[in-house]
Image: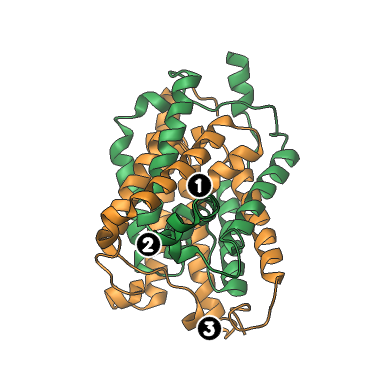
Amino acid sequence: MHSNKLEENKQRYLNPYFGGVLLGLLILLTIFITGRGLGASGSIKSAVVTTTNVIAPTHAQNNDYDKKFISDDHSPMYNWLVFESFGILLGGLLSGILFGRVKKFRIDKGPNITNKSRLIAAVIGGMLFGFGSQFGRGCTSGAALSGTATFAFGGLIVLLAIFGSAFLYAWFFRKLWI
Amino acid sequence: MGPLIPNGFIIGDWDFVIAILLGIAFGFILEASGFSSSRNLAGVFYGYNFVVLRVFFTAMIVAMVGLLYFDYFGWLDLSKIFILPTFVWPMIVGGVIMGLGFIVGGFCPGTSFTAIAIGKLDGLLFTIGLYIGIFIFTESFPLFSDFYTSGNMGNPTLMDVTGISAPWIAFAFTFIALAVFWITMLIEKRVRKTTTAYKF
């Protein structure tokens, strides 16, 4: 168990400032090509709207939120962010293969909680993040990072709200991580 | 010249090929920077690993300064790029909920995708959580449809709100970023001395 943990944490990563420069240039390139930045939560939203629209089309078309993303000529999955998110998965896999991090299914967690607690926390955290991202008009990628990078006032609000609040919560959830 | 797609330089389904390629680069950078591990990400909130903050702030100032140069050289028409709209109250509330999701779940959406890619089950469950959370939002939307559009300011930039010019705003962000990099370097050194459970 202990040696396993050592192995897991002894990783080769890019220098964070170098990674940051690459990511900044990528955002720049993305804006230069598409006129907007990168995103992530939008693809899950498309998946949710698509599911609702396939299972209960009338219900979806009567929902004021769902119907904003439904059109007659194509599925909500035919969306830039869905393709981009598929790319994120591939790119993550590519880097994982290159750095030797693609391994059998495993769980990352703090030293003082069980696997089960970690997985329950992951689902709850995901639910909160997904729910909040709809109010925020995007998540860390689309609103906080790409938004602020394009000088959008809303981007900075989301950025400060996410990170500022998370620092305040950190003490209460320390058992999950340290 | 730019942005290329809105200006009609690239048409048809190339749009989606480009989306996948840019996504691959995004996922690669996130994973290679260590964002596929929730422990690395959560480290920023406990002072043992500031990788998130370093990558995030560096990317932000590089993109900001880059945009200004692209505009200066006439390569990019900044009036044609998408400016995120501002809805003050829902964005604050949304951000505060996302912050809670971040500390509890250990990921944000993009990073959880890269975690899945290398076999992290917690990343997979976080993504399933995202789906459930957004589903709950869409189904309960009638309850807060008014709040959702409250505090609508249109699409203001930081320049519109503060009256400060873009180069000075980029300079301020750069200055703050450098100060934060230095301070967090000192914090990290101190915290790592007393942390044993996490091997660096």
Q: Residue at x 59, y 72 (%)?
A: A34
Neighbor class of circle 3 (other Cα within 10 Å; few <14, some 14-19, many 20+) is some
Element carrying mark 1: helix
Q: For residue A95, which numbered disc appears in the image?
A: none
Which amino acid type corresponds to the residue marked 3 in the rendered image? Answer: Asp
Residue at 59% of width from left, 63% of height from top?
A79
x, y percentage for residue A35? 55, 74
Q: Quadrant of the C terminus of chain B?
A: top right
Q: Residue furthest front?
A: A58
Mark 1 or mark 2, whichever is nearer to me: 2
Chain A colour in the picture: green
Q: CA distance from mark 1 to mark 2?
A: 24 Å
Secondary structure of the residue carrying numbered label 2 = loop
> Residue A162, how many percent across, how many down?
36, 49
Per the rendering, the mark at residue B109 is 1
Task: Give the residue pinned by disc 3.
Answer: B77
The residue lying furthest to the right in this view is A98
The one of B70 and B38 positioned closer to us in this rendering: B38
B179 versus B44 height, above or below: below
**Pointer 1 chain:** B
Q: Give me the chain letter of mark 2.
A: A
Q: Are marks 1 and 2 on the same chain?
A: no
| Quarter of the figure that contains the N terminus of chain B | bottom right
Q: Amino acid at mark 2?
A: Asp
Residue A64 numbered mark, or none: 2
Q: Nearer the viewer, mark 2 or mark 3?
A: 2
Query: Would you call the spot at circle 2 few (<14 residues within 10 Å), some (14-19), or many (20 or more)?
Result: some
| Structural crowding at the residue carrying mark 1, measured as other residues with C-alpha within 10 Å and reported as few (<14), some (14–19) or many (≥20) | many
Amino acid at the residue labelled 1: Pro
